[in-house]
Image (cartoon, rainbow, N blue to C red):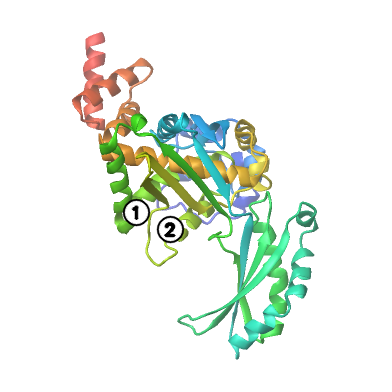
Amino acid sequence: MSQSHRSSRISGFHKKSPAERLAIVSEFAGLGGAAAAKLSDTGNLDLDLADRLVENVVGSMNIPLGIATNMKVDGEELLIPMATEESSVVAAVCNAARQCYDAGGFTSSMSGTLMIAQIQAIGVADPHAARLRILGRRDEIKAVCDGCDPILLKFGGGFRDVEVRVLDSQGGPMLITHLIVDTRDAMGANAVNSMAEKLAPHIAEWTGGRVYLRILSNLADRRLARAHAVWPLDQIGGEAVRDGIVSAYHFADADPYRAATHNKGIMNGVSAVVLATGNDTRAVEAGAHAYAARDGRYRSLTRFEVTASGDLSGSIELPMAVGLIGGATKAHPTAQACLKILGVASAERLARVIAAVGLAQNFSALKALATTGIQKGHMALHAQNIAMMAGAVGGEIDRVARILVERGTVRQDVAQAILEDMRAAAR
């Protein structure tokens, strides 16, 4: 299909089968047979299931699944499945966990399993009085909300409280109602959204305003996961390393430019476990970054301190809205296998383990930054990716990667030259 005649307006594309869609896309983009075959190979995800999980499916993109070892959380020995495309992420968790293993590993806790749904009302003549009118109808609100999901009630969840805020905005005052709902082992988006939708007409009637948005908040600050660990001096390399890590934390907590990269490193570990278990990476990431800026300045999600005995103490606290039921978590066979590997019996336990992984990830990053620099360990692993990009296969990959690291120049053009020399010498 020529550039001048192709169009992205494809009538009934969503009604076609994945194979038919792939044929259309292949013609549109000029894909060769090899590329189309890769897209049609969905690996361990059944194509029909993929077609039901998202829209307009043509294939799947497989992400490597690694296992982090050495993890001990609350005295329990764990293997951690992590889905990520970035080298050194899994290794970082393994190394951090090994260095605090003999000191007891990680301890964790959780603030609860409460989610928030927001209902926005505008054009309210007396917003402060209307706020009190809503608060005075708590029992009616509870009845409406709990009536939306009897199964959630059966498992001990449901409506817990209502809050109402008068919010100043560029468009004038808004009346924002928060429904506080215990979603138990579900992430809870569908449950709280349904409650907000059901209650919205009542809010409009009680306030005399117009209701627009009615949806959950991903700033799940009633669902905080916490983890803590102590790294003994003799395990991490002494006082200089400890002080370098603490100083790196101080830098991140004081400077948003540093904090953005610091927290991204935390999310390398967090998102890898969230994805492996079929949970919503974007929801968890949005909540974490919003929480990092909760006092008006974007700061570190972790804290590092020196204990009375001189060892390194690390802690983390962040929103963790994950579940064990519903969506891809329940439907995706790999997510189910990962949950079985973890052996978690509740969403709360999963959240606590993920927090520990985030803390481990951050420790390793700060230790590398405070000692050899982040590139040494990362590039040793990244060199393998560069070797493959240069065309190395089989045993060539390790040989090319080793030479790249030895030269201290991990670049694709250098890898191609090494590979050409290697193959010429073998002829």
Note whether 13 is above or below 414 in the view shown.
below
**In which quadrant will I find the N terminus?**
top left
Q: Is residue 167 left or right of residue 216?
A: left
Note whether 240 is above or below 3 in the view shown.
above
Q: Is residue 53 left or right of residue 159?
A: left
Q: Is residue 108 left or right of residue 53?
A: left
Q: Residue 158: tell me if it is visible.
A: yes
Identify the mark nearer the N-term, 1 or 2: 1
Q: Position of residue 168 (x, y in %)?
A: 49, 81
In percent of the image, x 21 and y 28: which residue is there?
414
Element marked by disc 1: helix
Residue 395's label in the rendered image is none
Mark 1 touching mark 2, by CB under 8 A? yes
Residue labelled with disc 1? 259
The residue furthest bottom is: 125
Classed neighbour count for the residue bearing mark 2: other residues with Cα under 10 Å, few (<14), some (14–19), many (≥20): many
Note whether 245 is above or below 417 in the view shown.
below
The residue furthest left is: 407
In percent of the image, x 45 and y 81: which residue is there?
170
Q: Nearer the viewer, residue 81 or 386?
A: 81
The residue furthest front is: 308
The residue furthest top is: 427
Q: Is residue 310 left or right of residue 284?
A: left
Classed neighbour count for the residue bearing mark 1: other residues with Cα under 10 Å, few (<14), some (14–19), many (≥20): many
- Determine which quarter of the picture holds residue 29: top left
In percent of the image, x 55 and y 34: which residue is there?
40
Residue labelled with disc 2? 292
**In which quadrant will I find the C terminus?**
top left
